[in-house]
Amino acid sequence: MLATGAAGGAGAFSNVKGAYGSGTALGAVAAGEGATAVLALVLLGLTMLGQSSPRVVRIGLWALPAAAAVMAAMAAPDAARTVIYAVTPMGMCVSAEGMAFLARRIVVHTDGWDAEAEHRAAAVVRSLAFHRARAANHPDARVRKSSERTSWRLARKVGTGDASLGSRLLDVQRERLTTGADVALADMFAVAVTPERHAVTAPVTPALPSGPEPQTPPAPAAVEADTVTVPRDGEGTQVSALTPEAVGKGVTPVTLAEVATVAGVPTPLPAEALSDAQLVVVLRHLRYSADPPLSYRQAVTAFRDAGFVGGEQRIRTAWGTLMAQEESAP
């Protein structure tokens, strides 16, 4: 790179010297290639320090060699050598940009962040915030419409060239894919075990002997349930027909405290740290709070909605323990 820049400067000096003399050629090379070399050193130093370069430095790296190329082209004696004279000073521009680009990549590789990319991203975000605010609150409708269009154009540039952002987004996507695959496999291979429920035996009318109909209807059969409240009519007499709705209202559901008592652990409370055994108790209670039992995803949603706290990995482990217990249960 240094050799390319030196060759470009020497060639520009030789070309201009033939037309204007050595003094003028030396000044032209100093103003063109020399100033470009100074800007290249500034850009290189800022890059090695991990700082973004000012825009005037980047513009000067191209503007000064371009001016030298125009001056050299005007010194060419014929059209054939005009192109050669014009291209020669651009060697310094390519050399400076190449050194700065290589230095920036070395800094990104060693430090893990790009100052230039962060500077551009910050500028885009600031401009986007300004245009979104102006599109929402400016009194002029035309200005609001213009800012709305500009904000959409800026939105396409957010994150462009940011390697660290791309790496983080990939990590987030990998985590989501892993969680989704884990949930899908758990739902696919888990054996749904419905807890035993007390059966309600329908009333059975005994066989009646032949003859006149009895005056008193037979008593209803016993109901196999924990607690069944038989509804009564308005006069206080017992209703002879036992409907399914009445039975459903009379059965008392199992509470979380009762499940925790059976498991021999303290009652889990929302917004408190839970042990592994308490996590299993909460998931068991939530799973069988509906018919059919909840899946893993539904149980996790109910777990969060109820205010319980626990890491995703601990919840998956507790769910696996619950599934293992269900598979081993008779």
Image (tube, rainbow, N blue to C red):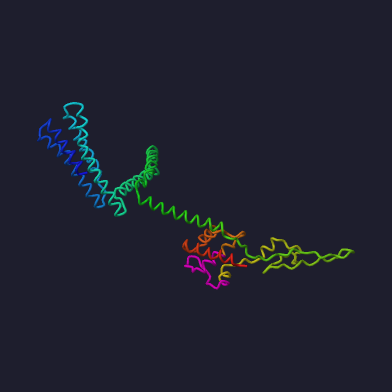
User: Which of the two residues, 24 or 140, is positioned nearer the viewer here?
Assistant: 24
Image check: 149 left or right of 90? right
* Residue under the image location 12 percent in, 37 percent down: 27
* Residue under the image location 18 percent in, 26 percent down: 78
Q: How many labels does the image show?
A: 0
User: Which of the two residues, 57 or 245, is positioned nearer the viewer here?
Assistant: 57
* Residue 136 percent coordinates (x, y): 40, 44
Above or below, 62 against 193 in this view is above
Q: Quarter of the image containing the N terminus?
A: top left
Residues rendered magenta in the picture: 261-284
* Residue under the image location 31 percent in, 46 percent down: 120
* Residue 47 percent coordinates (x, y): 25, 49
Image check: 199 left or right of 211? left
The quadrant where residue 197 appears: bottom right
* Residue 285 percent coordinates (x, y): 57, 65
User: Which of the two residues, 44 or 300, is positioned nearer the viewer here?
Assistant: 44
* Residue 137 percent coordinates (x, y): 39, 44
User: Which of the two residues, 232 or 257, is positioned nearer the viewer here?
Assistant: 257
Above or below, 166 against 303 in this view is above
Residue extending farthest to the bottom is 264
The quadrant where residue 36 appears: top left
Image check: 278 left or right of 167? right
Above or below, 257 against 50 in this view is below
Residue 3 in magenta stretch: no
